[in-house]
Amino acid sequence: MRTLAGTAALILTLTACGGSTTDTTTSAEPAATTSSAAATTTSASVDPTTSTAATTSTAPESTTKAPTESSGARFAITRVGLGVLGQVVIQNVGSEAGSLAGYWLCQKPAYYAFPDVELQPGEMAAISVTGRDDIFDPPSDAIAIEGIAELGEFNPASGEVGLYLGDNFASPDAIISYVEWGSSSGHGRSETAVAAGIWPDGGFVETTDETGAILATTIPPTDPADWFNGG
């Protein structure tokens, strides 16, 4: 496990995490066509002494147009640890290296800004959401981001997490990867993901109170069928 030193962003819990009065339902371009192959990763050399710093914001959700992903780098959520092992794994599913700076995670009403961590094509980075560094167990071939993404409990029986480019959490133009799990849909950001064309209306990955993780088997995942219940 490689560790990038530094401090992740302070996570601020917003009352709405999204300025509900400015939510838009404008559809974005459909997500890229998925492949049937399971996720593959390639290890890249990363200086473990590099310091990282995440950006935090106390302002209401932005209403400006989201920044644009670079043409070659593209990021997606490919693994979610649930319960006490709560974590999120982000993978560069694009063809060029790119930085996670400017990307955010959101489980309404909380959010987390990634530090400047560069991922090569196929490479992964993991961040804990539990508040427990002592039990953080990222994949062995992933960069472990120090600190905690305080998004609240990742309840094995019901939850969601979305990856955004920029901090306009209500905008379908900003959300780029999403998954919700449990026994029903309709979590805080599912409508935004549906409007963006990256998640089906009414879709969810079936989980129980005992589920420890869900893993993507199709990259990038855009449907519950693209996810495996890891038990």
Image (spheres, rainbow, N blue to C red):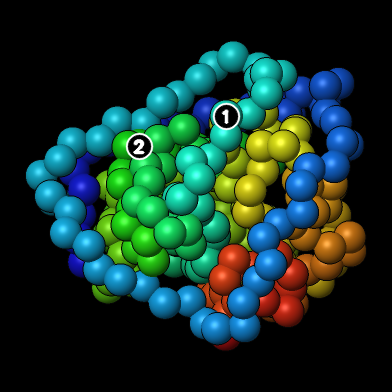
Residue underneath mark 2: 115
Mark 2 vs mark 1, CA separation in Å: 16 Å
Q: Do the residues labelled 2 and 1 touch (CB within 8 Å)?
A: no
Which of label 2 and label 1 is nearer to you?
1
| Mark 2 secondary-structure assignment | loop
**Horizontal side, residue 125 vs residue 171: left or right:** left
Residue 137 % position (x, y): 33, 68
Toward the top, the furthest residue is 59
Residue underneath mark 1: 67
Against 193, residue 199 (above or below) is: below
Answer yes or no: is residue 32 visible.
yes
Q: In which quarter of the image is residue 92?
A: bottom left
Q: Which of 124 and 83 is in front in this view?
A: 124
Residue at 52% across / 66% down in the picture?
78
At label 1, the amino acid type is Pro
At label 2, the amino acid type is Pro
Q: Nearer the viewer, residue 146 or 131?
A: 146
Q: In which quarter of the image is the N terminus?
A: bottom left
**Horizontal side, residue 197 vs residue 79: left or right:** right
Q: Neighbour class for label 2 at 10 Å: few (<14), some, many (≥20)?
A: many
